[in-house]
Amino acid sequence: MSGLGDVLAGRPPVPDEIGADSLGRPVATAGQLSARLRPAWAEIDLGAVSDNVAYLCQVVAPARVCAVVKAYGYGHGSVPVARAALAGGATYLGVALAEEGHELRKAGLGAPVLVLSEPPAAAMAMVVEDRLTPTVYTEKGLASLLAAVRARREESPVPFPLHLKLDSGMHRVGADPETVADLARRASAEPELHLEGVFTHLAVADEPDNPFTGEQLACLGSVLARLAEEGTRPALVHAANSAGALFHPQARLDMVRAGIAVYGLAPASSLTEDPRVRPLRPALSLKARVSYAKEVASGGRLSYGLRYQLGCRSVVATVPLGYADGVPRRLFEVGGEVLVGGRRAPVAGTVTMDQILVDCGPGANVRAGDEVVLLGRQGGEEISAWHWADRLGTIAYEVTCALSARLPRIYT
Ligand SMILES: Cc1ncc(COP(=O)(O)O)c(C=O)c1O
């Protein structure tokens, strides 16, 4: 079996069988490229992930980097991405759910894993069993963690780490300053627990000039000052997401929790050309091979609803992926394009569940088997997740997260 080390070191991969993680999602390596059954795939450049993390480490040093690999690594595949992020210098991993942390442990990853929101009481046993670091912001959360820690079966237990989360103004999850101080006091009084971290989350870090980030950091600072008065100084104070890490030096603190930048994407469309973002390389390309191509007469109308009409005789290519793979159904309506033969060509008609049509133009030399790039580069052209997002009125995060379980992931 070819290992990630081989892939990262550029050694030729040995073909593996197509595998699946325990959630049934395909886990593939570069060696499976020729073995795959389906001519549609997301290609993930793990070298780009490692390089992006190495860049972040350099930018935020001496702060450390927690690579956020929740939501199946933003659609890229959490386990391979986590390995590549650790190889690039990340020392912590971040997930949304205990189950996601469990996947990392099952794959043999031993790095610290922060569960970014307070796990429900029912998940605390898994948190403790898998040595995940829980976030806590309620009395109930602290009590259920303590109960799970007390029930653990380890012979010589060490104090179990937790991070407290402060709501400094985003009002999604987190405790108010008073409650954080109270929880810190209680956690510090329990010999079975270790208050490793205190953190908050920034609401507008992707608007570098917005003063609200400063207000949130000031709120965190006042809570830390209060804890310090009581003799508590957690080792890991953190606030920054990718935008915080890149655009707000004062937010870097002891650790940054970077997600989107790990995947090589800007935190906002308006920031894609910023010099602090430009060193990042998008890790994901979405590709397929033409399954069928033919000339269609001028006036021919295409796909469900017959909503695209050819102005002249044209070569129409069928590409075998659709909205069941995460290609938004609205991509046609918003003027979506693909790259084929090194040129941009319009998505021609309604995106269907398993297939899209592309108008390759009159006399185009496009045949079954030709590579089509929906996201990524071909020739001198590029379509990025932010191109889709801008057209669709969403964000690049949603574009990559929406790529479905059915789509094979190929790692290079
Ligand atoms: C608590 C928390 N920290 C960090 C991140 C990473 O954010 P980003 O992908 O913008 O870097 C997220 C993602 O939503 C988050 O919820």
Image (spheres, grey):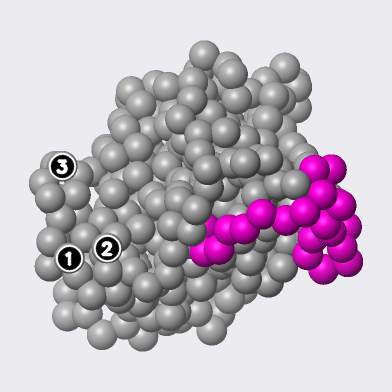
Q: Earlier in the sequence, mark 1 or mark 3?
A: 3
Q: Residue 320 in the image: x percent, y percent?
A: 56, 65
Q: CA distance from mark 2 to mark 3?
A: 18 Å
Q: Residue 327 in the image: x percent, y percent?
A: 65, 58
Q: Earlier in the sequence, mark 1 or mark 2?
A: 1
- Residue 299 magenta-drawn? yes
Q: Residue 388 in the image: x percent, y percent?
A: 68, 42
Q: Residue at x 58, y 76 (%)?
A: 120
Mark 1 burial class by Cα count in 10 Å: few <14, some 14-19, many 20+:
some
Q: Is residue 337 left or right of residue 287?
A: right
User: Which residue lies under the disc numbered 1?
Assistant: 15
Indicate if the residue with disc 2 has its beta carbon within 8 Å of ligand 1: no
Tell me the element at label 2. Answer: loop
- Quadrant holding the N terminus: bottom left
Please state which amino acid type lies under the numbered disc 3.
Gly
| Residue sitting nearer the eye, 378 or 323 | 378
Residues at circles 1 and 2 in contact by the CB criterion of under 8 Å: yes
Q: Which mark is residue 10?
A: 3
**Which is more foreground, mark 2 or mark 3?**
2
Q: Which residues are magenta?
A: 289-312
Does any portion of residue 186 appear in the rendered image? no
**Which is more foreground, mark 1 or mark 3?**
1
Please state which amino acid type lies under the numbered disc 2.
Ser
